[in-house]
C-alpha cells in the first residue's frame, strides 16, 4: 500500500478522485468484476486516509467510505464523485456528464423543416442543436457564419453522435441560406426575442419551412429579420427577455412538430 502520510490534501483528493472515476468508467463499460476490484481499491484508499486522520476538512469522506462498502449503481457513484469534483474545483463542461441513452432501432419520422443557425459562438450550443433537431425530426441543419461544425471535436462530443444522423451542411452567409430556402418555396421564420414580434403560435405555418436562429448574444440581424416571411418569438413571463438559443429552439421545434402532426 502506498505511503500517503506525506501527501498534501490536494494530492489526496486527486488520488480519491482518480479511484472513484475508475469505478465510474468500469460501471459505464459494464465490467462488473473490474468495478468491484476498483471499488475495493478505492475503499482501501479511503480507509487508509481515514486512519491517517487526513482530509479532516473534507466532511463527505465518512459517507463515501460507507457507500463503498455497499452495492453501487450509477447514481451512487455520481453522488460520491461530485463532492470530490467540487473540492478540487474541477472545471467540468456540460458535455462531460450528458446522458448518452439512445435507441437507434426506433423509426425516425422527419418533418420538412430546415433549421438554420447563424454564427453561434458556443460549440456546445451547436452540439445542442444537433441533439434537439434529431429529437424533433428536422430534415437538415444548416450552419452559417462562424458557427462550429462536427469537424470540431467539441461539437462531436456535445452532439452525442447525432451529427451522424442529422443531415447538415455549411453556408458562408445566412443570406445564402435564405436564398436557397426561397428557391425551394420554403416558408422562412426568424426566431427572435423582440416583443414587437408575434408569438410563434400566432403565425400561420406552411410546409416545407425553415427556422432561423441567431448568435447567443446578438441574435439575428434586424435587416435579415425584415427579409424573412415571418418573425416570431416565444412569450416569456419573467424579468429576462431571452432564452439560451438551444432552449428557445427546443420550444419552437416542439410546437412546430405538434402543428405538423396535426396538419
Image (cartoon, rainbow, N blue to C red):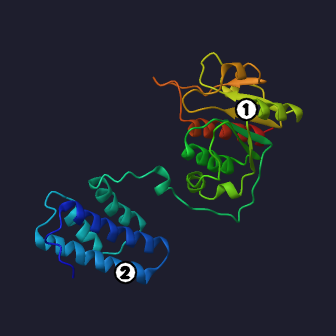
Tag on residue 130?
Answer: none
Residue depicted at x 40% and y 78%: 35
10 to the left or right of 52: right
The correct choice, above or below, for 148 with respect to 192 in the image is below
Residue density around tag 2, few if under 14, some if 14–19, many if 20 or more, within 10 Å: some
User: Would you say residue 206 is visible in this rendering?
Assistant: no
Q: Residue at x 36, y 65 (%)?
A: 76
Disc 1 from disc 2: Cα separation: 53 Å
Q: Which residue is drawn at 35% across and 82% down?
A: 37
Instruction: Name the quarter where the C terminus is drawn.
Output: top right
Task: Kindly indicate the quadrant of the structure image that contains residue 20.
Answer: bottom left
Image quadrant assignment for residue 50: bottom left
* Image mark count: 2
x and y percentages locating residue 112 in the rendered image = 80, 43
The residue indicated by pointer 2 is 36
Q: Is mark 1 on a helix, strand or loop?
A: helix
**251 lies above or below 94:** above
> What residue sits 54% from the left and 35% below the top?
244
Task: Tell which circle, 1 or 2, labels the residue nearer the N-terminal end.
Answer: 2
| Residue 127 image offset from top left, x and y in percent | 60, 48
What x and y, as percent, mark residue 145? 67, 36
- Residue 30 lies, with reference to residue 179, above or below; the image says below
Q: Nearer the viewer, mark 1 or mark 2?
A: 1
69 vs 8, left or right, is right
In this rendered view, identify the residue nearer to me: 42 or 218.
218
Q: Can residue 134 be seen in this view?
A: yes
The residue to which callout 1 is attached is 174
Q: In which quarter of the image is the N terminus?
A: bottom left
Q: Provide the secondary structure element on which disc 2 rests.
A: helix
Amino acid at each position: 500500500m502506498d505511503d500517503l502520510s506525506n501527501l498534501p490534501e490536494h494530492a489526496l483528493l486527486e488520488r480519491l478522485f482518480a479511484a472513484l472515476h475508475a469505478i465510474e468508467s468500469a460501471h459505464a463499460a459494464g465490467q462488473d468484476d473490474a468495478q468491484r476490484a476498483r471499488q475495493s481499491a478505492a475503499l482501501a484508499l479511503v480507509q487508509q486516509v481515514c486512519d491517517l486522520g487526513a482530509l479532516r476538512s473534507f466532511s463527505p469522506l465518512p459517507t463515501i467510505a460507507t457507500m463503498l462498502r455497499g452495492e453501487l449503481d450509477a447514481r451512487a457513484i455520481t453522488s460520491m464523485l461530485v463532492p470530490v469534483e467540487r473540492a478540487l474545483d474541477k472545471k467540468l463542461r456540460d458535455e462531460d456528464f450528458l446522458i448518452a441513452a439512445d435507441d437507434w432501432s426506433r423509426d425516425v419520422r422527419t418533418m420538412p423543416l430546415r433549421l438554420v443557425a447563424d454564427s453561434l459562438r458556443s460549440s456546445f450550443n451547436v452540439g445542442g442543436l444537433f441533439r434537439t433537431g434529431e429529437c424533433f425530426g428536422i430534415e437538415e441543419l444548416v450552419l452559417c457564419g462562424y458557427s462550429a461544425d462536427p469537424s470540431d471535436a467539441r461539437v462531436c462530443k456535445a452532439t452525442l453522435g447525432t451529427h451522424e444522423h442529422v443531415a447538415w451542411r455549411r453556408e458562408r452567409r445566412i443570406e445564402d441560406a435564405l436564398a436557397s430556402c426561397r428557391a425551394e418555396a420554403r416558408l422562412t421564420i426568424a426566431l427572435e426575442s423582440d416583443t414587437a414580434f408575434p408569438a410563434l403560435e400566432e403565425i400561420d405555418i406552411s410546409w416545407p419551412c425553415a427556422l432561423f436562429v441567431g448568435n447567443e448574444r446578438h441574435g439575428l440581424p434586424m435587416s435579415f429579420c425584415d427579409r424573412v416571411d415571418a418573425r416570431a418569438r416565444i412569450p416569456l413571463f419573467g424579468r429576462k427577455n431571452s432564452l439560451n438559443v438551444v432552449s428557445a429552439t427546443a420550444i419552437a421545434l416542439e410546437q412546430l412538430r405538434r402543428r405538423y402532426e396535426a396538419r
